[in-house]
């Protein structure tokens, strides 16, 4: 071929090269001599101008893997040597690759042809901005000849596949690295989208039309079906393009009056992106009847191959359905501005075509269970989800009404019913379609019901009835499955042992459906629960209750989800749909939600009877009881919009009104009527005590009682103030303080229980009563710890297992107590901490080899300092500072924490990184000490006598810094804590860091170097803040005539040996390199500006010199001019001055943001 690059070698040399590559490939297949393989193949890939050799191998070798390696070598060499190739060379390489693919389109080794096609696509993109339009058209004309079928089916498929690879190459997310600025890729993407993308779609469309006729008018062959499915797949991939320049939708609203949405709904489990190609595509996708033809084609093919049970899973059927589902997401200006009328017809057209895939649901589900294909059914569910995410709830429900006498919600209900039945009644492990379909359908329910908000009028009465009927089926199926699982082995009841999170996610979706038809679903749950409860009561001791208990367990779970929301970390409110329902109910005793709630509460209270508890309440059932009570109490006892008996109401739009809807008032107040709230609280406390004392070893149950139920009781002051008056609360407090049985629960539960009990002290109105309560709860554990450390035989018994366990429990309890510190209880808790300071130092000495105890001591001190330091006056601060100094010195003296990674390879795993958690605790301790100088709530008038916290930080730095190696900073938790501390300390005490010895200071600087390149955004931000503080300190010191950081010089390897540079010199170079040439994240631009400005001010001459070097290194005059202009604007726009005050920093932030936007396109390389 004329213009093909490289010097032609003699035949013998070419053959020798080919044989060497073939031998290396045979070694790969035999997994032999990898070093030799790497040498031979690497030599070909890195050799200069290997094109003639690679061409010979492609044309002459009988080994497919050798041809594959030769194709790859052509691509790599061409990209590497691009500047050495002429335009004719480049065009010849592309055409050779395309001709090779077309000529060998029928060859069996498809992966070789695919590799050659990808090389052609890559090289064509590399030449995109160099080739003239005429040269591009000449290349594409050859491809078009193949795509339209001039050369037969196999070359047709090859041409289609090449365009598919080309689309992928031009797409930003899948493009190959070429070592070029981002601007190049963006220009190629824009040009490709505007000038060729639609044309390629039309080519694929034409190919599909021609091939479809052949397939429909004959039996078709494999090549024709392969080419047709390839054309449809190409159309699918083109529509997946991230359109950036085509769509200019005129509407400003996200929802048209017709109900069509223009925004993307965020789904929980599935990705859905609206396809907005713009008005230029209207004739191709909408006006020409493209969608209708595609739908008719699939229907005709479906009928033609109805005898073939495998056809639904064929590549052609699969590709066609994927394109049909994708067309559901068409949106924006591709449709005319007719208030969504055309788009509505488009959706109705698609829905009409997919109805046979899913209807009738019972027949389809039975067919799938009998071995039929599930593909159509699953894709039909996906289509419904796409439509739901594109429309409002009302419009979604109406889409089907032009085709059927019922709405889309009715269809959705019927589909979900059949899938739920299949899941619960015909479940087999190999039938993954059930799980997949149910996830899609429940996601669709979530979309339409969350989009509806509290306005149930957007769904027809028929739709509400359908949702209620669906929930009835859900309950019936699950109750039957629960009862049937009662006597099954664990292996046979896998569904009921699924992960808690997955189970709760599904139950939460069921609950949303239930609330839509609350008028019938809540009474249903109340009736079913009361029936099972009655059956249990009547059969006490006379019949096996296992089936009933399994049903009650499931009813507890679904009832909890229907009546309450999860709201982790949020204040729970009564679900608005429940408040808006039952408008005709005027008496609390007749309200279904009240009746259901009392049924569950009364059932839960049965566990307080020892006989009933031993007969019925297993640990698993108790877990459900405690879980339900925790959510119910948090939701229904004193909701946020109920305060001091005054009830506020909200309308369907969330606006507070003064209406008098009885149902809303009942739900917001029934918990406190006739002292019922006190009864519920008393029951919750006693049930918690039963869980903690009567179920030894049940850690999950006890964790729920301590961390969920009891913690909820003290979270709201309204509840807590009633709580502390109850005898049952005093009982649990006495049991915790004085009885040994609660030492048997897990350490975390003891810590949580201590925190809960101490939190309650703040709700006692009388100060003396509050103080006495604290002494009663805290005193015994403080006394126990002090007495144990005062024993004369402590050293001899301390290492015994029971002694270590007791000390660990006491430390966990103390941690819980200090974490509950509030202004009213702060002094009493400080006295407790003061009392155990010396014992803790003794324990640190004694247990120096017990890492678990050392960690607990450190964590207690961390929590104590964190809770107390901001409240302490000078005297108390001095006590705390002295204690922390002694603690650090003891820790250092025993060399605790010096563990080398080289000692054990097992320590390299993330799970083993917890061996370093004592180091993390020390970092947290130092950071908490720093906070005293940032936030101080103490009331001391004389501040001059305050102790020097900076001295503790200074000592701590010298102790901790040598222990934290660069290898340890690879562990995320330790790394985050370390950089947070360094940033914090440099902000508060930069002068102390500047005084560190050379080794410690150099170590901190080297860690900041590492942190700047970290993947964690928070770590990079902390490093930038640290550099900003360091450079600002140096600038201010220098401005006042002081040395600053001049004494702290860093050594680096230069061309003339070791060089010494200042800290600001070092970071200016590093930050400039990062901003200009590395993948810097724009969300960090503000933090980078705060660090960059003081560095420039400190090293103005160096900065100018570095900028000049960068400009001189630019060979392209246009880019050099743009770069010079960008640097000039960086320091001159917005009247920037030589100052670090806030206004100047804000100006520089704006300047740097514009600078990064300007230079990103032509300096960032991909």
Image (cartoon, helix red, strand yellow):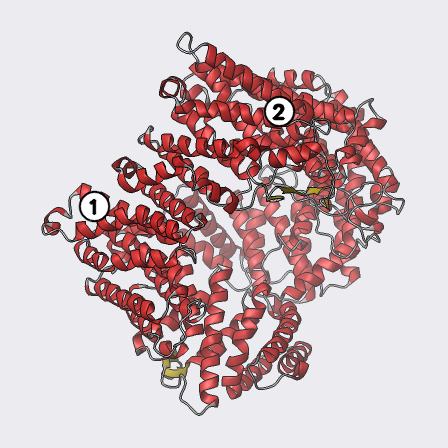
Image-quadrant location for residue 1011: bottom left
**Towards the viewer: 572 or 1146:** 572
* Residue ID at (73%, 63%): 131
Q: Earlier in the sequence, mark 2 or mark 1?
A: 2
**Towards the viewer: 302 or 518:** 518
Nearer the observer: mark 2 or 1; the answer is 2
Residue 301 in view here: no
Helix, strand or loop at label 1? It is helix
Image-quadrant location for residue 1116: bottom right
Percent position (x, y) of residue 267?
64, 41
Q: Is residue 627 above or below residue 137?
A: above
Q: Is residue 457 above or below residue 874?
A: above
Quarter of the figure with the C terminus: bottom right
* Residue ID at (48%, 54%): 17
**Towards the viewer: 733 or 923:** 733
Question: Relative to residue 1062, is residue 452 drawn left or right?
Answer: right
Number of other residues with Cα within 10 Å of mark 1, as a class: few under 14, some 14 to 19, many 20 or more = some
Q: Residue furthest bottom?
A: 1041
Percent position (x, y) of residue 168?
66, 50
Question: Relative to residue 494, is residue 637 drawn left or right?
Answer: right
State the mark number for residue 348.
Answer: none
Percent position (x, y) of residue 314?
66, 28
Percent position (x, y) of residue 752?
38, 44
Q: Which residue is mark 2?
A: 589
**Towards the viewer: 183 or 151:** 183
| Count of residue discs | 2
Q: Which residue is mark 1?
A: 804
- In space, the residues marked 2 and 1 are separated at their CA atoms by 54 Å
* Residue ID at (54%, 47%): 68
């Amino acid at each position: 071929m004329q213009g093909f690059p490289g010097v032609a070698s003699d035949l013998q040399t070419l053959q020798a090269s080919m044989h060497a590559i073939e031998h290396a490939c045979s070694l790969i297949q035999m997994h032999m001599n990898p070093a030799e393989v790497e040498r031979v193949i690497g030599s070909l890939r890195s050799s200069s101008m290997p094109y003639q050799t690679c061409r010979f191998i492609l044309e002459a070798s009988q080994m497919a893997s050798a041809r594959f390696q030769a194709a790859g070598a052509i691509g790599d060499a061409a990209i590497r040597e691009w500047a050495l190739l002429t335009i004719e060379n480049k065009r010849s390489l592309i055409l050779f690759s395309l001709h090779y693919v077309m000529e060998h389109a029928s060859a069996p080794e498809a992966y070789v042809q695919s590799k050659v096609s990808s090389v052609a696509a890559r090289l064509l993109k590399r030449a995109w901005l160099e080739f003239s339009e005429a040269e591009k058209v000449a290349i594409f004309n050859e491809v078009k000849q193949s795509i339209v079928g001039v050369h037969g089916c196999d070359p047709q498929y090859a041409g289609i596949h090449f365009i598919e690879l080309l689309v992928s190459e031009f797409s930003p997310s899948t493009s190959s690295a070429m070592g070029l600025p981002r601007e190049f890729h963006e220009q190629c993407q824009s040009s490709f989208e505007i000038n060729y993308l639609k044309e390629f779609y039309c080519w694929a469309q034409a190919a599909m039309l021609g091939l479809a006729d052949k397939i429909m008018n004959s039996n078709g062959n494999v090549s024709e079906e392969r080419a047709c499915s390839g054309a449809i797949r190409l159309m699918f991939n083109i529509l997946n393009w991230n359109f950036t320049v085509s769509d200019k939708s005129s509407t400003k609203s996200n929802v048209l009056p017709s109900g069509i949405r223009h925004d993307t709904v965020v789904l929980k489990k599935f990705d859905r992106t609206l396809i907005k190609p713009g008005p230029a595509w209207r004739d191709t996708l909408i006006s020409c009847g493209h969608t209708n033809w595609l739908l008719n084609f699939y229907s005709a093919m479906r009928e033609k191959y109805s005898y073939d049970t495998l056809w639904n899973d064929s590549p052609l059927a699969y590709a066609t359905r994927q394109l049909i589902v994708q067309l559901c997401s068409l949106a924006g200006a591709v449709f005319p501005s007719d208030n969504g009328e055309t788009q509505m017809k488009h959706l109705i057209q698609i829905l009409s075509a997919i109805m046979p895939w899913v209807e009738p649901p019972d027949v389809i589900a039975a067919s799938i269970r009998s071995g039929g294909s599930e593909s159509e059914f699953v894709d039909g569910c996906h289509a419904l989800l796409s439509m739901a995410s594109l429309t409002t709830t009302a419009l979604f429900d109406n889409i089907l009404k032009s085709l059927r006498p019922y709405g889309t919600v009715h269809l959705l209900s019927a589909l979900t019913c059949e899938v739920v039945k299949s899941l619960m009644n015909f479940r087999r492990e190999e039938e993954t379609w059930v799980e997949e379909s149910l996830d899609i359908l429940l996601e669709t329910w979530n979309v339409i019901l969350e989009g509806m908000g509290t306005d149930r009028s957007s769904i027809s009465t028929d739709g509400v009835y359908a949702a209620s009927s669906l929930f009835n089926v859900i309950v019936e199926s699950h109750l039957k499955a629960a009862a049937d699982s009662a006597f099954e082995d664990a292996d046979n009841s896998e569904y009921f042992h699924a992960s808690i999170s997955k189970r709760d996610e599904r139950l939460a979706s069921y609950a949303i459906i239930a609330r839509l038809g609350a008028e019938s679903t809540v009474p249903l749950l109340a009736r079913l629960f009361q029936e099972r409860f009655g059956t249990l009561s009547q059969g006490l001791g006379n019949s096996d209750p296992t089936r009933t208990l399994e049903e009650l367990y499931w009813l507890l779970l679904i009832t909890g989800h229907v009546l309450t929301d999860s709201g982790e970390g949020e204040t729970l409110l009564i679900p608005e749909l429940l408040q808006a329902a039952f408008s005709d109910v005027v008496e609390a005793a007749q309200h279904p939600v009240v009746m259901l709630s009392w049924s569950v509460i009364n059932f839960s209270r049965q566990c307080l009877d020892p006989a009933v508890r031993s007969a019925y309440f297993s640990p698993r059932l108790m877990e459900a009881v405690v879980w339900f009570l925790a959510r119910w109490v948090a939701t229904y006892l004193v909701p946020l919009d109920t305060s001091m008996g005054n009830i506020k109401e909200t309308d369907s739009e969330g606006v507070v009104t003064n209406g008098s809807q009885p149902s809303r008032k009942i739900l917001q107040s029934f918990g406190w009527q006739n002292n019922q709230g006190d009864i519920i609280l008393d029951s919750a406390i006693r049930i918690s005590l039963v869980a903690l004392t009567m179920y030894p070893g049940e850690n999950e149950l006890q964790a729920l009682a301590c961390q969920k139920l009891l913690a909820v009781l003290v979270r709201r002051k309204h509840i807590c103030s009633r709580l502390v008056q109850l005898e049952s609360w005093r009982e649990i407090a006495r049991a915790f303080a004085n009885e040994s049985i609660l030492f048997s629960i897990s350490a975390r539960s003891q810590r949580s229980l201590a925190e809960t009990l101490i939190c309650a002290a703040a709700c006692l109105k009388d100060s003396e009563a509050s103080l006495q309560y604290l002494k009663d709860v805290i005193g015994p554990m403080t006394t126990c710890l002090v007495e144990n450390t005062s024993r004369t035989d402590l050293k001899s018994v301390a290492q015994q297992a029971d002694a270590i366990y007791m000390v660990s429990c006491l430390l966990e309890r103390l941690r819980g107590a200090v974490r509950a510190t509030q202004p009213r209880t702060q002094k009493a808790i400080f006295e407790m901490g003061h009392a155990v300071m010396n014992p803790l130092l003794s324990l640190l000495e004694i247990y120096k080899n017990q890492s678990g105890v050392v960690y607990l001591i450190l964590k207690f001190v961390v929590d104590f300092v964190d809770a107390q330091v901001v409240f302490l006056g000078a005297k108390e601060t001095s006590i705390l500072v002295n204690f922390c100094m002694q603690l650090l010195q003891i820790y250092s003296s025993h060399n605790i924490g010096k563990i080398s990674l080289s000692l054990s390879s097992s320590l390299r795993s993330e799970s083993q990184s917890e061996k370093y958690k004592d180091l993390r605790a020390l970092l947290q301790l130092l950071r908490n000490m720093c906070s005293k100088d940032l936030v101080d709530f103490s009331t001391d008038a004389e501040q001059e006598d305050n102790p020097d916290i900076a001295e503790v930080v200074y000592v701590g730095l010298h102790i901790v810094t040598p222990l934290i190696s660069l290898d340890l900073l690879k562990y995320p938790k330790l790394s985050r804590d370390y950089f947070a501390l360094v940033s914090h300390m440099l902000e508060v005490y930069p002068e102390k860091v500047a005084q560190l010895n050379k080794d410690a200071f150099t170590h901190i600087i080297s860690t900041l170097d590492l942190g700047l390149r970290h993947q964690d955004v928070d770590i990079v931000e902390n490093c930038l803040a640290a550099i900003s503080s360091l450079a600002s300190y140096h600038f201010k010191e220098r401005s006042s005539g002081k040395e600053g950081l001049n004494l702290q010089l860093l050594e680096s390897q230069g061309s003339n040996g070791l060089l010494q540079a200042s800290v600001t010199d070092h970071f200016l170079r590093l930050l400039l390199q990062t901003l200009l040439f590395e993948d810097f994240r724009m969300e960090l631009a503000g933090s980078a500006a705060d660090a960059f400005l003081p560095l420039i001010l400190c090293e103005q001459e160096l900065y100018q010199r570095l900028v000049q070097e960068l400009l001189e290194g630019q060979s392209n005059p246009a880019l050099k001019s743009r770069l010079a202009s960008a640097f000039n604007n960086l320091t001159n726009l917005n009247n920037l001055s030589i100052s670090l005050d806030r206004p100047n920093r804000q100006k520089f932030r704006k300047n740097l943001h514009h600078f990064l936007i300007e230079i990103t396109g032509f300096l960032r390389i991909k």
